[in-house]
Each structure stands twice: as C-alpha cells, then as structure tokens.
Image (cartoon, helix red, strand yellow):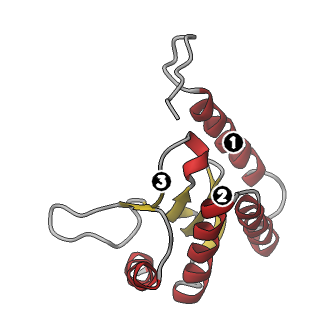
Amino acid sequence: MADQRDTTGDGLSSAERAAVKQRAAELREQGRAAKGAAKKEREAQACLDAIAALKGADREIAQRLHEVVTQEAPQLDPKTWYGFPSYARDGKVVVFYQPASKFGTRYGSIGFNEDAHLDDGVFWPTAFAVLEVTDEVEQRLRALVRTAAG
C-alpha cells in the first residue's frame, strides 16, 4: 500500500497523524488519577486490547512477543506507545511491536528503544522485520528481550 501523504503541509500521512493522536491520548490517560498498581493494570489492559484489535499475522506476532516478554523479562511493564503493544522499564519503552497494518507496510517490526541494553560497539540493530515467529525466530527474540531488559 502506498503512503498517502496529506496535502495540509505537515508532511504526515493520515496513519502517522492517527498514531500521534493515539500517543497524545496515551499521555493524557497516564496523567489521570490512577497511580501505582492501578495505573500498571490499566496500561497492561491497554496493551492486551491493542493486541486483540490486531488481525492475522500482526496479532499472532504481537501475541508471541507478549508471551516472550512476560516469560523472559517479567520486570518490563506492558503498555501502549503510539498505539503499539509495548513493554517498559521505569516508564520508558524498551521493546515494542509495530504492526504492518498500522502504516500499510509489507511487514511488522519488533523494535528496541534507546533504553534497551543492546549496545554492541558503535553499530547495532534496533528493529527487526517480522513476517512470522518461527521457533528459530522465537529463540533469537527471547535472547534479544533478555539482553534488552538488562
């Protein structure tokens, strides 16, 4: 699917604009009264809801990532980030899944933000294209998540 750019001058596609609006809503929700365990519970449910809303391979990959993270790095908190299923340490997203359907791309991607402990010299990957999670992919993903979580 081609990226349809808006002509309003901001250079964002409608999908990108929607993601920015989702992030603003997430930030507003985070600022609400709930704190501590109630906040974490609400954010975890938002992550599960984001996964449930996906279809096909996107849902399968997001579910497998969720299983891997909860087993390998239970210290990471599930939440959403720009509407993506994400996992954070101290409120900062470490790993996330960007579904292919979000921006009409050929593949989804599992990404790691700067708080992931993946540094390897002066050059290392921070995102991986994923078409499906095979046993081999899952084993590599488990190792990456363990390392990223620290």
Q: Residues within 10 Å of mark 3 (few under 14, many from 20)?
A: some
Residue, disc 1: 22
Hey, which quadrant is residue 65 in on the image?
A: bottom right
Residue at 79% over, 72% down: 41
Q: In the rendered view, does 127 fall on the left or right side of 79? A: left
Observer-nearest of 145 and 93: 145
Q: Residue at x 56, y 41 (%)?
A: 104
The earlier-in-sequence mark between 2 and 3 is 2
Gap between marks 1 and 3 measured at Cα = 21 Å
Is 60 drawn above or below residue 142 in the view shown?
above
* Crowd tier of the residue under label 1, counting other residues whose Cα lies within 10 Å: few below 14, some 14–19, many 20 or above: some
Instruction: Tell me the number on the disc at residue 80.
Output: 2
107, above or below 52, in the image: above
Residue at point 55%, 82% (across, down):
68
Q: Position of residue 42 (x, y in %)?
A: 80, 65
- The secondary element bearing badge 2 is classed as strand
State the SS at label 3: loop
Residue 7, image x and y in percent?
A: 55, 11
The residue under label 3 is 107
Which quadrant holds the C terminus?
bottom left
From the viewer's perspective, is the residue at label 2 or at label 3 nearer? Answer: 3
Upstream in sequence: badge 2 or badge 1:
1
Give the mark nearest the N terminus, 1 or 3. Answer: 1
